[in-house]
Amino acid sequence: LISKQFVVDAMIPKKSLPAVPMASESAPVNIALVKYWGKRNEELHLPITDSLSVALSLMTTTSVRQAPCKDEIILNGQRLPESSAFFLRTARFLDLFRPNSSFFFTVETKNDVPTAAGLASSASGFAALIKAINTLFDWRLSPEKLSILARMGSGSASRSIASGFVLWRKGVLEDGEDSYAECIGNPWDELRFGVLLVTSEAKNIGSGEAMRRTVKTSPVYSLWPEVVERDLKAVYQAIGSKDFVLFGEAVERNALFMHATMQTAWPPICYWKPETILAMNSVWSSRSQGLPVYFTMDAGPNVKVFYPVSKEKEVLAFFPSLWQIPLLW
Amino acid sequence: LISKQFVVDAMIPKKSLPAVPMASESAPVNIALVKYWGKRNEELHLPITDSLSVALSLMTTTSVRQAPCKDEIILNGQRLPESSAFFLRTARFLDLFRPNSSFFFTVETKNDVPTAAGLASSASGFAALIKAINTLFDWRLSPEKLSILARMGSGSASRSIASGFVLWRKGVLEDGEDSYAECIGNPWDELRFGVLLVTSEAKNIGSGEAMRRTVKTSPVYSLWPEVVERDLKAVYQAIGSKDFVLFGEAVERNALFMHATMQTAWPPICYWKPETILAMNSVWSSRSQGLPVYFTMDAGPNVKVFYPVSKEKEVLAFFPSLWQIPLLW
């Protein structure tokens, strides 16, 4: 079994002390169009399939500097207790990068988006953090290497290294050296995105555990790799030809398929809330009235929609509570 | 292509006039434990898989007699307009059994259960109707033949001919001669059933169309036959050994799988309402508190639960709105 530390040590230059007193970097939230769902390596967060996302203009900005005697993590202005899950997960990630065992970090991180919205993901967080660490130590790592290192924190963080459409290739190597994300395709300026906010309640099951249980117990999961291939091909083609209907159908069916794999796991997993059903139905009803709106959903209850700018006015009239978020190209 | 009329003509004795002035028969509502989902023959309602149900002590009672000059259908005391869907569907079924083209029926049918509850299915209706026709003409058909003829009205009606646990074998013959239902297993007196009523709104898509679209477009449907085999085996074994947990798990996962096949069809099909999500979650939460309660769902939003009589008190305390319905052995 290859450890994270082994991968990190093989990748970064000889560890040294900070090159600058403090470094600050940003990374965008990303929304998966074709989902990352299932790991081939739990430790290294190596995925079973490729996945494809688009970046949002919602950023996490993180600064790092050396701390005198212990790690210190400040999230949106609040110092976190050392026993909090966020602190522990971040500190474990920092462990990989300490020049020596008595080196500590102060990490200050800010999200553009209220954590409550269910969009402030760990993805942008780990991406911003590794970028800031890279700058602090002046490692000058390539985007590919930053993507691989971000993945050590959270799989989908590998995609928050770039903007625009981002493809995370699953790779085939055991150490994940070829499992990183990169920008593909050109900006699609006419594409619009928004969120139908459902709830900010905490999930009752984390996505890591949900993935594991699904891979292990759902008979539907056996079809997931070919479904991803089918949907990737369609989204690719749609991006190239700016075919919105092709794009929307592939994105929506991919998300519904992912949820079908969970629903057929045992015990069953359902992230949907009552308002999720209302939101899905309102999207379907808008389509039946001729509006080209398609949704995606992640491992949570919120419904996120895509539509073309040409129909923006009608879409906003139909969904008065839609929270529009610009894409980041 | 074999027509319904061909099958009927091969099965019933020479058609003659009524042997009695009027005949009245009853048939129970049935709840599928392992679902009927997908047809191998649309005309004859021949299924792709076996299915298994249990009968409820909710009956449809139907009387038939000859009518002077045109069909007349009275549902729960209300004479139906000839243009109503119910009238048309029933009259088309009656067509199969008229001794001559100028023979008309008066059909009076009553459901124990308010149609609004989403439980008054066409299954008990067609089963009661064919039983009454059989008595009216004194055909003395075997239960197997009645099951086949009920199937001409609605697939699941083939299972409403018997009480208790009922297995509908898919059969392999082209004319469906071997596709009928029969009682299997012994009564399970400790088994309890109830409904968490969600809504009585009309469905926006009929189950026939939903089946067709699912079979045609859902990649998940390809797994359905083996899932049915797996779940049938488990329910069989559970019935034999009165193993409630084995029973409940198989029943619940079978229903969720059926809904997963719809959800992955295109356009997607979702019968769930917001309250469906609440009901499913309350069942899961009752289990996490140690109550052995499992649900099933049909092509509709209501959630139906099974539990053992030994936990009846606790279950009723947990689900104060549960509508208990005795099973029919």
Image (tube, coloured by chain):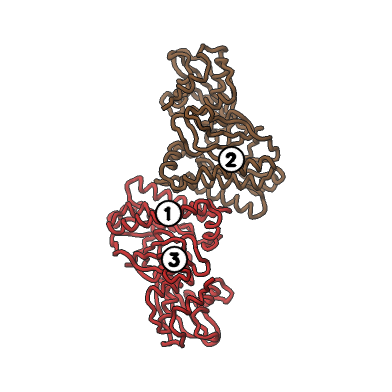
Chain colours: A red, B brown
Rounded to the nearest angstrom, the CA distance separating label 2 from label 3 is 43 Å
Q: For the C terminus of chain B, which image quadrant?
A: top right
What's the residue type where badge 2 is placed? Leu
Camera-side residue: B54 or A309?
B54
Q: Position of residue A51 (x, y in %)?
A: 41, 62
Foreground label between 2 and 3:
3
Q: Mark 3 falls within which chain?
A: A
Q: Can see residue B130?
A: yes
What residue is disc 2 on?
B33
Q: Which residue is mark 1?
A: A226
Res A167 quadrant in image: bottom left
The count of marks equals 3
- Identified by mark 1, the residue type is Glu
Q: Residue at x 62, y 42 (%)?
A: B235
Crowd rating for badge 2 (residues with CA inside 10 Å; few <14, some 14–19, many 20+): many
Chain letter for mark 2, please.
B
Instruction: Name the residue that disc number 3 marks.
Output: A172
C-alpha gap between disc 1 and disc 3: 17 Å
